[in-house]
Amino acid sequence: MAVRKIVHYPAEILEKKCKEVEVFNKKLARLLDDMYDTMIEHDGVGLAAPQIGLDLRVAIVDIDDESGTIEMINPQILKQSGEQTGPEGCLSFPGLYGEVTRPNYVMIEAFDRKGRKYRLEAEGFLARAIQHEIDHLDGILFTSKVTRYYEEDELKGEEE
């Protein structure tokens, strides 16, 4: 397992629709392990393959709750509903945070590292993180959804 280098904006790969994963093997499992290590090292709650320079529909989310680490390969959003607005940041945009409105509920279908299809429902912050990572796989950056950017001191107040 290894920590990979994070790709920062304006790298072209960040705005590209990624290719479907077709082979589920040890190389994919290693990639997922590396993505997890990279996400943890950089204090993130999610990471998509294009953020480490790979054109693959692979993303992970771990918001540090009972849901554990969610590995999403070739994910598709089946349903969305409700609305939530809150701060978002991105490892590919260090130090940049903005207010983003997203659906509060999401149902996805994806594959795990062994190629088994599963469905997952999420609400609140987990739904936000999942949608943010799936956006990455479609070349959509959170900055295109920001209604206003936060100043650094605004965020410090929210964390206390």
Image (spheres, grey):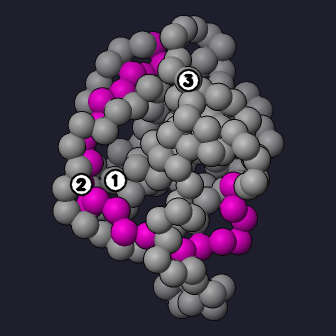
Per the model, the C-alpha gap separating discs 1 and 3 is 23 Å
Label 1 sits on what residue type?
A: Ala
Distance between the Cα atoms at labels 2 and 1? 6 Å
Residue denoted by label 2: 105
Of all residues, the one furthest to the right in this rendering is 5
In the picture of the structure, the residue carrying the numbered disc 1 is: 127
Q: Is residue 83 left or right of residue 45?
A: left
Q: CA distance from mark 3 to mark 2?
A: 26 Å
Q: Quadrant of residue 53?
A: top right
Which badge, 1 or 3, comes first in the chain's sequence? 3
Horizontal and vertical percent position of residue 97: 59, 73
Dot 3 amino acid type: Lys
Secondary structure found at label 3: loop
Which residue: 56% across, 23% down?
A: 19
The mark closer to the camera, 3 or 2, is 3
Would residue 159 be found to the left or right of residue 6 on screen? Answer: left
Neighbours of disc 3 within 10 Å: few (<14), some (14-19), many (20+): some
Q: Position of residue 46 (x, y in %)?
A: 54, 48
